[in-house]
Amino acid sequence: MYRYDEFDAHFVSARVEQFRDQVRRRLAGDLTEDQFKPLRLMNGVYLQLHAYMLRIAIPYGTLDARQMRRLAHIARTYDRGYGHFTTRQNIQFNWPRLKDIPDILEQLAEVEMHAIQTSGNCIRNVTADHFSGAAADEIVDPRPYAEILRQWSSLHPEFSFLPRKFKIAVTGAPHDRAAVQVHDIGLQAVRGADGNIGFTVFVGGGLGRTPMVGRKVRDFLPEEDLLAYSEAILRVYNRYGRRDNKYKARIKILVHETGLETLKADIEREFEEIRGGVLDLPQAEIDRIVGYFAPPELDAGADDEAFERAVAADPALAAFAECNVHAHHGAGHASITISLKPVGKAPGDATAEQMEVVADLAERYGHNEIRVSHEQNLVLPHVRKSDIPAVFAVLVGAGLGDANAGLVTDIIACPGMDYCALATARSIPVAQRISERFASLQRQRDIGDLKIKISGCINACGHHHVGHIGILGVEKKGEEYYQITLGGSADENTSVGEIIGRGFSYDEIVDAIEKVVDTYVDLRSDPAEDFLAAYRRVGDAPFKEALYGSA
Amino acid sequence: MAARLYRAGGFVADDWLLLGDEDAVPETGRLILPLARFLELAGAGRSEPRFAVLVKAHEDPQLLAPHLAGLTLVAVAFEKFSDGRGYSTARLLRQRLGFTGEVRAVGDVLLDQIPLMRRVGFDGFAVSNEPTIRALEAGHDVDVPLYLQPSERSDEVPAGARYWARRPSGAQLS
Ligand code: SF4
């Protein structure tokens, strides 16, 4: 894991002091709210419906037990005893007081954490595959590159007042678990013919009002060019991205309006000027950062035997093993998803006590590593398989044992009307009601892999466009209405879901979703054909028919 | 109120006059001309040492390339502090075009943005915002004096062993 050196430590504490001073000047009236807003946003401080919200960065979703315990402490001391893990691998606290925030930031700095650039029109926290460094199918651990990008983008003097927010994601495996194609820059690590590492680069992906899949601008960008090329993209965007309309200000619109070929040429021209300079990454520096992410020393004698025996004897553990245990590159090891989606609860929420349980487990069984997934779950990336029964028992005891990773109740939902000032509809209660409807684990397992994603307004923070089933809450004549999209996906075959027809009321939406799911179960060619594959095969007609009858 | 010019750690006298798009060009005095007018005059063979240029956010500083040797000042307009295009303008002037004269930020120039502006190459700040003037007069520095991007500023030095870490060579403001 990355460790702060003296420089980083000074950097974050100087940043806390800077923010403390900004808050002081805001309260003294030297800064107007208009002037203060981008400053607080760059420190993760949002003004929500009822209160300020603080969004804390968890770079590429990686943290250790000490950091998790500190988050628990903050939840208990400054909030209402819980926190909310987000789709960008961050954590949000919904109820801190503005005057406490500098103190919270100071406490974070003590454990090498911060809230820098978790919001605002700047380069946001860089995200990565939550199984980085562990997955069996990985080509290269993407986190060193995410860390290099994090450092380069931190308080970047030229790119702190971009037209709009800017998100970068990196994945190191052919199966994309980081949704890179729906980011402003998506990087997919590849190994070149000569064995060298590089990236396939996508630009201009994004959701929001105008969902777009990223366009490929480079098949192979050598790793040493990562920063120079990123700087070129950002400079082109900073200069030419639209600033007249915030809904047209993301780079995806620039790609769309300029045309891919022209924009690609602009980027390449800029890159030609920048490359060969101080932003070229020396191999020694890459190696040094890679060194921080050295894989933990795994137990070489570990095997699957005890685990398989336990699974055979315990159906609950078997269910957990099927969904929440993932292939690891190390023999006798696995990565475990800890579901933050218990039936009937708000997706992504964890109590302080639960955070502490996870911290203890990470220390005892998981080489002191924890991940936050963009699916709003937690992950223990490196666990010996023979320890899984013990881990599972502790998770069950803490209300964290749901064996539903990737299933119909593993729902992503944005905060919606419960917290967000922009919301046009509730989203968390819809997730809760759907998960209650499908509460039977037997039924969930029978349905199989299915991603439901819910947004409470057109800004699409719940990523509904890329849900296999997406739900968008809108307002119609003072009432909440829910539009269903089908066929979205955010993996290496990213697609934007299609609206199936007229929306459903808050009361009707759960029935409608159930109809869609039942229709799929009836028409799939065999149980191994998942929802997305079936939808891609048959199209929307059977679902339309089920929802609206024949026209 | 009229802007005051902050340079090299203090407020200094300033005799440059910012000329509007429609204003007649006076016969004497130092003038900052809008880019289009400057280029028009230069095209007509009128380049004078008393002329400087104002580059607006959407304008391309590379148009100045053939004229920079004769200029001592390029001003960059920030109509709104939240419009970040001027930062790229300054970097292009310094890094790409090698301009060594004064690069001055004019318009909505605020205390919290000045450290960023310095790092992309600004060395003059025409400030009208009262609280900003007060803070600068009091020597109130709001910079985080540790940088994670190597930049072209000659007064930044490597910090520690890390390849791209920098800090200011002197702790002084501007
Ligand atoms: S999608 Fe809309 S309601 Fe949901 S968090 Fe984003 S802005 Fe708020």
Image: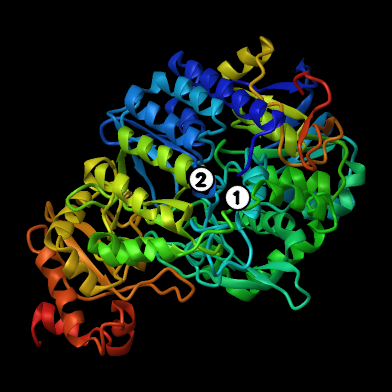
The alpha-carbon separation of the residues under discs 1 and 2 comes to: 9 Å
Q: Nearer the viewer, residue A158 or B5?
A: A158
Q: Are marks 1 and 2 in contact (CB under 8 Å)?
A: yes
Q: Residue at x 32, y 38 (%)?
A: A354
Q: Secondary structure at mark 2?
A: loop
Q: Is residue B74 visible?
A: yes
Q: Nearer the viewer, residue B151 or A4?
A: A4
Q: Position of residue A245 (x, y in %)?
A: 45, 53
Amino acid at circle 1? Pro
Marks 1, 2 in one chain? yes
Q: Residue at x 40, y 20 (%)?
A: A100
Mark 2 surroundings: few (<14), some (14-19) or many (≥20) residues within 10 A: many
Task: Look at mark 2 in the image and give the residue it sits on.
Answer: A369
Residue B44: tell me if it is visible.
Answer: no
Q: Secondary structure at mark 1?
A: loop
Rendering coords of residue A93 (x, y %): 35, 34
Ligand 1 near label 1 (Cβ, under 8 Å)?
A: no
Instruction: Tell me: A492 left or right of A197.
Output: left
Residue at image mark 1 = A296
- Write the residue at 69% across / 72% down: A191
